[in-house]
Image (tube, grey):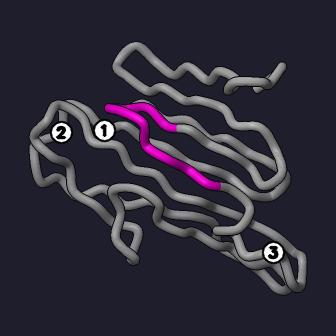
Amino acid sequence: MTSVVLAHGAAEVRAHLVTGADPGTTVRVTGWATGDGVRAELLPVLGLTGSLAGVTGDDGGTLFVALARLTGEPDPVPLEETVTVHRTGAGELRVRWSGESEVRVRLDGSGVEVVPGPGTGTA
């Protein structure tokens, strides 16, 4: 498994490329246990059902992406409004935080590469 977590404040984009698993292997994304005044959120973006589970394909690698947040804010902006994620190819994503420039992410068997998108100076 090759993974990357991009964080912006309390929000995260979690991307996992699973390779070498038998086709049909179940993958599940999990989060945190919470206490009083703390809320955990997980939302499926790519390759996952509403229960945050998915299965590997037979194409040599399956990409799973979820949004996550652990916060004590009483009324945060909805998580899905804080970031957009688009798949641009096998193991490739574009991630744009609300009001920010995008970054491009590539995951493969050799690792992870995160690069600034057009017009940005940093990732």
**Which of the marked residues, 3 or 2, is nearer the chain's N terminus?**
2
Whether the magenta-drawn stretch holds residue 71 is answered as no
**Circle 3 — which element?**
loop
**Circle 2 — which element?**
loop
Report the amino acid beneath label 1. Val
Residue at the image point whose x is 56% and y is 38% from the top: 94
**Which of the marked residues, 3 or 1, is nearer the chain's N terminus?**
1
Position of the N terminus, as image quadrant, is top left
Residue at the image point whose x is 65% and y is 21% from the top: 115
Position of the C terminus, as image quadrant, is top right
Numbered range of the magenta stretch: 84-93
Crowd class of label 3 (few under 14; some 14 to 19; many from 20; radius 10 Å) = few
- Identify the residue position indicated by label 3 in the image: 77
Callouts 3 and 2 close, C-beta under 8 Å? no
Residue at the front extreme of this rendering: 119
- Looking at the image, residue 9 sits to the left or right of residue 57; the answer is right
Checking the image for residue 21, the label placed there is 2
Q: Observer-nearest residue: 5 or 85?
A: 85
Label 3 and label 1: CA atoms lie apart by 31 Å
- Foreground label between 3 and 1: 3
Magenta region, mostly helix, strand or loop? strand
Callouts 2 and 1 close, C-beta under 8 Å? yes
Label 2 and label 1: CA atoms lie apart by 7 Å
- Identify the residue position indicated by label 1 in the image: 18
Q: What x and y, as percent, mark residue 58?
A: 10, 40
- Looking at the image, residue 99 sits to the left or right of residue 56; the answer is right
